[in-house]
Image: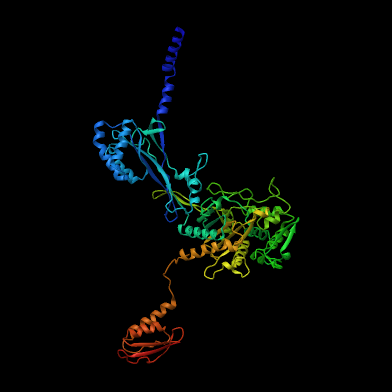
Amino acid sequence: MFVFGLAVVFKLVSLQFLQGDKYKSLVEKQAVKNVTIPANRGNVYADDGSLLATSIPKYNIAIDAVVSSNKLFEDQIKGLCDSLSGYFGRPSADYDKLIRKARINKDQYLLLARNIGYSDYLRFRGFPLLNKGAIPGGLIVEQNTKREFPMGSIARRTIGYEHIDDYGNVTRPGIDGAFGVKYLRGVDGKRWKQKIGKDKWKPLTDYNQIEPQDGYDIYTTIDVNIQDIAHHALLEQLDKYKADHGCVVVMETKTGEIKAISNLGRSSKGVYYERLNYAVGESHEPGSTFKLMALAAAFEDKLVDTSDVVDTEKGVISFYGKKVRDSKNGGYGKITISKAFEVSSNTGIVKVIDQAYRKQPSQFIDRLYRMNLRHNDSLGIPIIGEGKMTIPDPRIKNGRWSGIALQWMAYGYGVSFTPLQTLTFYNAIANDGEMVKPQFLKEVKEFDNVIVPFKKEVINKQVCSKETVAKLQQLLKNVVIKKHGTGHRLYNENFSMAGKTGTCQKDYRDKDKLNYISSFVGYFPAENPKYSCIVVIHEPDKSVGYYGADVSGPVFQKIAQKIFTDTPIIDEVKSLEIKSVLAEQEFENYYKLAKTYKTVMPNVVGMPAMDALTLLENMHVKVKVNLQGNGIVKTQSVKEHIKLSDNQTIILTAS
């Protein structure tokens, strides 16, 4: 017993003096903690200042039912319960019973309201008892923020949102994720809280030890009007063709600014919503839209020209037992390369590329590389999840090269691009060869102060020669203008477009799963383009239609037409101070006549009829004009220098 007693005394001394600080620290950590107060994320705006995303502060209001003195509690409890009754609509007696029960049970955290707005928070702070603060009123305030999207689902995937996966990991796709840490997030605050029960913590004070600092605001390149046009045009077509998903991107040609980006996928209930950012993240075989890249390489290497003739071989050619077919049975016979592109002849384009590069396929790959179409590369945009390009290369280990790789590449199989990557190349052709990086931000601001401006980034000053660019531009115009072009049904005499249709088989190795990817990519107006645009629709209902010209082309046309109608492209007049010698001379002659002739007939032959009419009516005579032609006076019924009387009628003949 004596030894046991010594052991107990030793343990007590050890805990008290040797390990005391350690255990005191552990107790304090468990009872009190410094809680992070998240800063409000900065706002996200459209290019015209329309609010796209904002952080709204929300508040939880609770009461420590124990901290108040008996006198203060009894004086204020009725007023508090009446105020709660007025706010929630429940009887005051219910709240009196609830709060008194919490006081008896020594409940230091009784939740009164959850996720209320700032104005309601101020209202609660004015309620009796709570207006005394944390001590002695027992007021407990917990603040959090909620991300709101005032314009609904518009460009939601691109703007970004908070996504929590099954494991609790938080990610922010889109602009919010790309620029959140650097600009939007702000600096978090700190607040001490004390543990008062199982999983319950209450603030020690009614103020923050460190106040959070809000993040910067960012202004995107999104045009809400163009975005709305693109979104609804895509939605209508997806629904018509019962497609699985699709996307649209509209880019400003000169700057690379993304004016609209819509990504819609179909739910199990048949409802379309922003499921994934297909435009940025989904890399797939482009099909016939790649024919422009293939011909660009051949033109640049001067191996073929638009006027060269190719035999389409009755619409079927074979390579190692694999067949390339045209959509038209029997093919197109012997046609020019320009014509082959217009009608999107697979056999024609494949045959041209095969003859040009079969002995030197690496030359074809190198030319694509010089046009910034590189294997396993990307545009390097800041949005998370950009897909990689795929370009088969015989010099790369596991470079996806085969005996038919070159021929299949020629008409868009075996290669892979995201819609945004394909659009960037077409935009370079519209931009006379200058490839610009897609841009999503205009500037970062703190109130009215610009913190970071974003300017145009040039990826490649000249992807190919001016001569090649001119040929490609003409090919793209012909697709829409020419009667036999695959996009001829999109032609509208009121506004011009240029572009290329694309129809690619999806899951073509399994006939039971065979589907299609329909696309259209191009720019408008055809001369001096303002915007480029790509439309990609996956897995349209084959019984309704699947060709790019039928499925995706109308979306492109509707976007172009509505942009022309709703947001007309305006040529700014630099100055209205334009002098015309002829106009000034006519005015001098008119002014001289008006001063000279008061009551006698002047000679108005040779004058514009409208000027003669004005001059004579100011002399208080009646004038009748027989207008037969362009409005120049040829004869007058009263000769020059004849005195006129009031209300006399003069007949002029203009021819």
Q: Residue furthest top?
A: 2
Would residue 177 be seen by someone viewing this image from the given angle?
Answer: yes
The answer to whether residue 526 is above or below residue 55 is below
Q: Residue 615 at what x, y percent from top left? A: 35, 83
Q: Residue 528 at what x, y percent from top left? A: 54, 64
Nearest to the observer: residue 518 or residue 53: 518
203 lies left or right of 228: left
Q: Residue at x 28, y 41 (%)?
A: 92
Nearest to the observer: residue 325 or residue 370: 325
Q: Residue at x 69, y 56 (%)?
A: 408
Q: Residue 261 at what x, y percent from top left? A: 51, 55
- Quarter of the image containing the C terminus? bottom left
Q: Residue 469 at what x, y percent from top left? A: 61, 61
447 lies left or right of 67: right
Q: How is the image coloured?
A: rainbow
The answer to whether residue 564 is above or below residue 84 is below
Q: How many marks?
A: 0
Nearest to the observer: residue 68 or residue 152: 68
Residue 244 is drawn in which quadrant?
bottom right
The answer to whether residue 343 is above or below residue 23 is below
Nearest to the observer: residue 62 or residue 382: 62
Would residue 465 be seen by someone viewing this image from the given angle?
Answer: no
- Quarter of the image containing the N terminus? top left
